[in-house]
Structures are given as structure tokens and as C-alpha cells.
Amino acid sequence: MLPYVYQVTKYDPADRDQHGHYAGTEDTTSDHGPVETAYLQAVAAFAEDSGVDQLAIREPQLGGFAHFGLEPPVDGYGLAGLFPAGAAGFHDGALVPIGVGVELVRAMLRDNGAWCRLEAEGEFTVHVGWDQYLYLGSSRPCEAALTRTRALGLFTQRLDASPYDFAPDDPAYVQRPADADFWARLGWTVSAHRATFLEETFAVNASRWHRLSRDNITTVRSQLAPRAQLSVWPDLLTDVDTAVAALPGEGLVKIIWENEDGQITSTVVDETQFEDVTSQLAGASAAGVVSQYAGEDLPLFTAVLPDSDGVLRARWQTEPTPSDRDWAFLKTLRRGQVVTGTVTTIASFGVTFVDIGGFTAMINIPELSWRPINHPSDVVSVGQQVTAEVLDVDMVWERVPLSLRAVQEDPWPQVAQRIGQVVTGPVTKIVPFGVFVRIEDRKDGFEGLVHTDELDQSPQDVIEVGDALTVKIMDVDLVRRRIALSQRQADR
């Protein structure tokens, strides 16, 4: 927060009533003349006193809700000629010289439909508020600028902070960066045909849409505006009539459509504009309708482009999708971490699913126990709380395999100490190369192999499952987890 913050206005404090409400004759819109010029000269004076010659655009907004509605909107939102690359140049982090910054202030004072914060980090800020209120922050006292501003006929007031300082909607929410993991997941999603559209939002209410394929993701990525917010959406409906039928009876929606030439367009409308937009869809090859109300029609997942050094500096905050929430949770996990969860499902193919903090992790059969089991239900049951170790955190597939046995004592070293012992146990399985015998008196006891060469039965003897055999433990392989037994050596 900057130490010196001033409110600059054309409103004389002497014209305020006892409640602080302005009761003078000044209009709340720009005069497009000498008063506006005074505001702009004040901005330039404070920038000079602050030692700043360029400003960064932060949180840009275009049209729609960014427009205060006091003056008629103009073509180009007042940005005409300021950005050679067009409106997409008006993006978060774009650096502009003071001259362009002053022109942006003019557009905001005139309520042309563009708005942003202007900042030189740690040195200077410019915020334009409702009704021609201007807030200038500096790391310096700016005494000369204050004198100059007052001489221009404007009024100044020292404040603790600008009411337009950035404040996140949810300080605890961390936006996913469009990093290597994001692009890998996007590639996998496109390959699986779960999504083919990428919405690139470079300013509030200003988006570009891209149809994605496995072949063009790299090209699309190279053309995105810096610090853009990205939203991955399912494919549009090729049955345009079905898309039109999805329009609600009332409310605010975004309609997206693709023309036969591949051009993708979107617009935000309410029920009073449905009929007009519907007529535009007549020649569309695909279309979709997305609700603009919180909690409805969320994209599959979102992200924000970091800067070239990999640092995410854009302060976008979107409503987190289920995938975004999973990503945020996965970022808190580490391989080897011990977690507690509740068994939710035991799948028919043997995988056990566990809820850990709202995320569904999984335990494969070999990781349920050190001991042999036939089915996960031999170890766990639905609703049971378990403690397990995180084996891996896959940010692309959003999978977390767990191990229940990793938090249990490994019994195999104790089995290895029994080499040379003679035991009697039941035959559990017969295979072409020998038989398996359980060497512990428990249902999940370890089993060892008696190879055919180590059996001493005569050819006429028949061994069946359940028969008791006396065997000697010859070897325990701790790497491959195998036990070698011998019946021939049992009586020696």
C-alpha cells in the first residue's frame, strides 16, 4: 500500500451538506473541456513527482458491467488509436507511456466503456471512480503536484487508501496457472474429445474463442494475449435449434456460435435481446448457451497465463470449477504424505476409492495389505475411515494413488527370520510346477511354493487343495516377495 493517497475532484467541499453529500452544481459527467483537462494535467503532475514515465494496466474491463452508464458508449470504448494490436492490447500487465495512461484516464472520465487500474508497482497508482472521483497514490509526498492540482481548480484530500485498491473476492482462492501441467491436461482433454473450445478472456467482458484440436493447440497458445484468463468448455452443439431451445425464459446468458467459415462469436444478452440474437444464429454451424449466474454452467477447468518467467501476476479470480478445486487440493499433497479418508466405493474390478478432503483417491489391491487377499472387502469396507500414504500426485490426470500397507509394519523381514523352520500347513493352490502351502495359521497367512522337484510323494499319491503338508522354509526373497519351500528337506 502506498503511503501517500489523494482524492482529486472538481467538487468543492464547501458545497457538501452536514451528511457529506454534494449539493453543488457540478455535473457528475465529464465536461469534455477545461475541467477534464485539469484532471489529466493533475495525473501527469503526480506521475512526474513520483518519478514515473510508464504505467501498467491492471484488471482491464470493457463494456457491459464496466460501463457506468452516465454517457452514451462509443465505438472502441475510447481506446481507438491507443493500442496498435487493437482491443486485445488492452490486457493486464500491458505497459503504456504516461501519455497513453492519461488518455485512458480520459476514456474513463468520459465513461466510454473501458476501465482499469493504472499502476507503477510500489511507486504510483491511478484509479478513476464513479462521478468523476480520481484517486492518486504515490510513494512520495508530491507537494509540487498538489500545488499544481489546486491551482488547476481541483480539490484534494489526503486518504489512508484508495477505495479502488484491488481486493480479491476470496483471499484464500488460488487461481490455477496455465503451466506445463495445465497444457498437458488440456491436450489430454482434447484428445479424449471432452472439450474443443478455449475461451480467452483478456479483459472483463472481452473474450476470444478458439476451437481446439490436437494439431493446433501450440498455435493457439502462441497467439493468446498475455495474462489472459483461460476457460476450457465442452463442444458447441451442432444442432443449433437445440441450442436455441436451451435459452431460459429470462435471465442473463452468454451465447456462443460458430459460422460456417469457422469464425466464433459470443455475446452476453438478457431476455429482451433473445429474439435478435436468435436471428443471428440462422446461419450458424454450431452454438451454445452459457448462464452468467454464479454456480451455473461452469467450464471444465480454468487457468491464467503466467508471465514469461513463470510467475502468475494477473489477479483474475474465477468461480472455481470442480476440477479447479481438485487442482487446488492436489497442490497441497506431496508424495509420502500420510492422509486420512473414508472408503466410498469398492469397485467391481478391485480398486478402492477413498474420499480425502473432498477429493477421490484410489487404492489398488496390492497396496491394501502386505498379506495376500482375494478381494478389497477382506481388508476394508464402505464407510470405514482409513489412514494411507500418498504414492504419487498426478496433476495431469488428477489422480492420487494411495497405499494402506505403506503405513503398516512390513511383516516380510519377520518371515525371513523363519528360514530353516519346519511347519505344517494346508495346500492352497495346485499349479503345473508345484503346490502352494500356507505357512501361517491365519486366513491371510503367507504362502510359499513347493516346487515339483521338492515334493517327495510317490507317483500314485494325489495332492488336493486342503491337504496338510509338512515343509521346510528354504528361502525368503524380500525383493520379489516369494517364499521357497521343500517337503523333501522337512525331515532332515
Image (cartoon, rainbow, N blue to C red):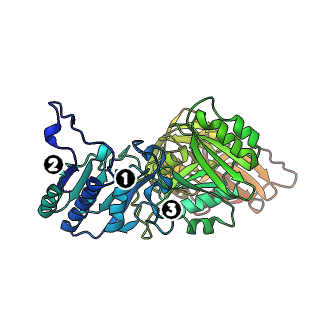
Res 157 label? 2
Q: Is residue 364 left or right of residue 155?
A: right
Relative image position of residue 397 (x, y in whole percent): 59, 55
Quarter of image, res 249: top right
Disc 3 marks a residue whose amino acid type is Ala
Say which residue appears at 59% left-offset and 30% top-offset.
Answer: 250
As shown in the figure, which amino acid type bears the numbered disc 2?
A: Gln
Q: Nearer the viewer, mark 2 or mark 3?
A: 2
Q: Quadrant of the C terminus?
A: bottom right
Q: CA distance from mark 3 to mark 1?
A: 18 Å
Residue type indicated by callout 1: Met
Q: Residue at x 56, y 67 (%)?
A: 223
Q: Secondary structure at mark 2?
A: strand
Q: Position of residue 192 (x, y in %)?
A: 70, 55
- Give the mark, 1 or 2, whose residue is nearer the N terminus: 1
Q: How far apart in space, not on screen, are marks 2 and 3 (Cα)? A: 36 Å
Q: Nearer the viewer, residue 312 or 166?
A: 166
